Amino acid sequence: MSLSLFEFCQWLNDTGPAAALRESTIVFPIVESIHTLAITLVVGTVAMVDLRLLGIVLKKEPVSKVAGQILPLTWVGFGVMLVSGLMLFAAEAEKCYHNPAFRLKLILLALVGLNPLVFHFTIFRSVDRWDEAPRTPGRARLAAVLSLTLWSGIIVAGRAIAYFK
């Protein structure tokens, strides 16, 4: 017997840990705050790299150096964001299933995940040729604009989840 996605969300929503988190007046807001701080770390670090690609900040620093120093923090934030986000989803899985803002957030998360994959497997492969240039190639700047736009959309959609009940 297979579960539909909605049935899975109902089951997840009704598990003991999800119910305990949802009903906690202390733990739920702490997890939510950790999630928000992790998003801040991810978006802040990604924005620094994107702004370097756009030639707005750290113009004299090589792109590879900026990315190499900043992106490890991005991965830490991403891990914390993922775990805390999954916990929040489990606690409200049934609500999230019907929430259009949550669905939009998932779509944007998928797109924001594809953006660096495409970037790193295409334009970034030739970074040694444009690494120290104050003006990066057009495709690198486009990837940066897409990244900043998608992350902004994720933040807005994530915040909107609370208003669609």
Image (spheres, helix red, strand yellow):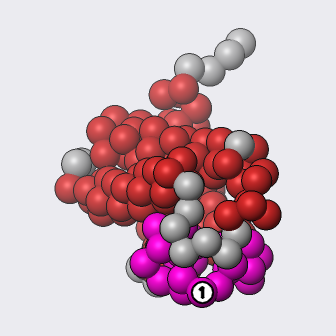
Which residue is rendered at x = 46% and y = 67% of the image? Answer: 54
* Residue 31 shows up from this direction: no
Query: Where does label 1 land, which residue?
Result: 60
Placement of 119 over or under 55, stated as above or below: above
The kind of residue tagged 1 is: Lys
Spot occupied by residue 30 in the image (x, y as percentages of width and height): 50, 82
Where does the magenta region start and end? 45-69
Spot occupied by residue 22 in the image (x, y as percentages of width and height): 46, 64
| Residue that extends furthest to the left in the rendered view of this protein | 163
Spot occupied by residue 76 in the image (x, y as percentages of width and height): 71, 75
Image-based side of 34 in relation to 161, left or right: right
Spot occupied by residue 18 in the image (x, y as percentages of width and height): 57, 57
Report the quarter where the N terminus lies. top right
* Residue 124 shows up from this direction: yes
Residue 69, by quadrant, is: bottom right
Residue 79 shown in magenta: no
Image-based side of 42 in relation to 121, left or right: left
Image-based side of 49 in relation to 67, left or right: left
Which residue is rendered at x = 30% and y = 39% of the image? Answer: 100
Residue 136, by quadrant, is: bottom right
Which residue is rendered at x = 37% and y = 56% of the image? Answer: 149
Residue 58 shown in magenta: yes
Placement of 49 over or under 96, stated as above or below: below
